[in-house]
Image (tube, rainbow, N blue to C red):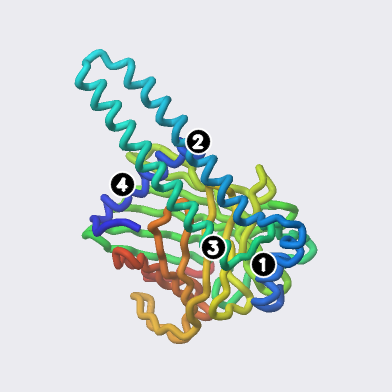
Amino acid sequence: MKSKLTQNQVLRVRHNWKRDRRGWLAAASAAGVLLLLNLSGSAVNAQGVDACAQTSDLAKRSCLEATQSNYVNALGKCANLSDQSARQACQDQATADRNDAQQICQAGFLVRQTSCGQLGPAPYDPVIDPANFVTTIDNPYFPLVPGTTFIYEDHFGGSLMRDEFAVTHNTRVLDGVTCVEVHDSVFTNGALTEDTLDWFAQDRDGNVWYFGENTHELEDGLIFTIAGTFMSGVNGDKPGIIMEAHPAVGDFYRQEFSLNNAEDFGQVAGLNAHVTVPYGSFDHCLKTPETTPLEPDLLEDKFYAPGVGNILTLDVNTGERTELVRIIRGQ
């Protein structure tokens, strides 16, 4: 996704990209889960509609149109610079930014098209029945016990990133489903750089659904973007599967759906990985590569230990490792 940078530079790239994007874009078995998420491809084909491909095309068009609008607006700002050389530099930068944004739109389209080959042509319209959900989340790969805090650290580039993933006693109702609220706080060299509330719920079959997030990214103590914020049932946003009840190698699924805003995909690549992190060594770990059309170069491998949860996130391109270092229980 990104070149070999220091942690601060990595964060700057992520922050700048998300700031720009805001302008550009403003089930008891794995087979059962896939059926729920993909619905019936044959029925869609009979209607002559490929909803997945259509969505990919429309998302790209929206992205390109927003990019052009942002470019024109930038030129309007350049026009108000009195110095000719400064005005020209401003226009050149606006053009470069537009070209970069257009490339991201096209690359994101290719990611979506590739995903359609796995998901099939059906509309993504999961049926959410509140009666099908339970009040606890005890999936062995993604247990969320209120009062538990997972501490992760990343020393990439000589800087320290600390992520505190705290399962709260709070709940929030989304799409009629009572969700567990997680407070996720990221600190870079001691400064708060991301502050997020995530909402999860588990269905009766054991699948854990991701119903939304309220995220703030900060710089110098100030919020500069809320890109990625979504809530299931609001503005066409829909939940996705964050963890299957019975992962099987090859499963491919949406983890969230907020078009041009939050679109992560997960895939099961293995069930027997051996992983060592500061918290300990674990066998029979689940490995899930994750991608998103919003950051087309990103490829992260996530590893989950049975009975523990996420223990490692590995950036495949940079080698950056976010490792579990501690679990605090009973808060």
Residue where numbered disc 3 is placed: 115
Badge 3 crowding class, 10 Å Cα cut-off, few under 14, some 14 to 19, many 20 or more, is many
Instruction: Name which quarter of the figure residue 58 lies in.
Output: top right
The residue at 32%/58% (across/down) is 161
Residue where numbered disc 1 is placed: 202
The residue at 53%/51% (across/down) is 262
Badge 2 crowding class, 10 Å Cα cut-off, few under 14, some 14 to 19, many 20 or more, is some
* Percent position of residue 61, x then y: 53, 42
Q: Amino acid at mark 3?
A: Ser
The residue at 31%/46% (across/down) is 12
Q: Report if the CB atoms under discs 4 and 1 are less than 8 Å apart.
A: no
Q: Quick check: can you spot residue 33?
A: yes
Q: Report if the CB atoms under discs 2 and 1 are less than 8 Å apart.
A: no
Front in this rendered view, residue 58 or 93: 58
Residue where numbered disc 2 is placed: 65
Q: Earlier in the sequence, mark 4 or mark 1?
A: 4
Q: CA distance from mark 4 to mark 2?
A: 26 Å
Residue found at the very far top of the displayed protein: 82
Front in this rendered view, residue 327 or 133: 133
* Percent position of residue 121, x then y: 65, 61
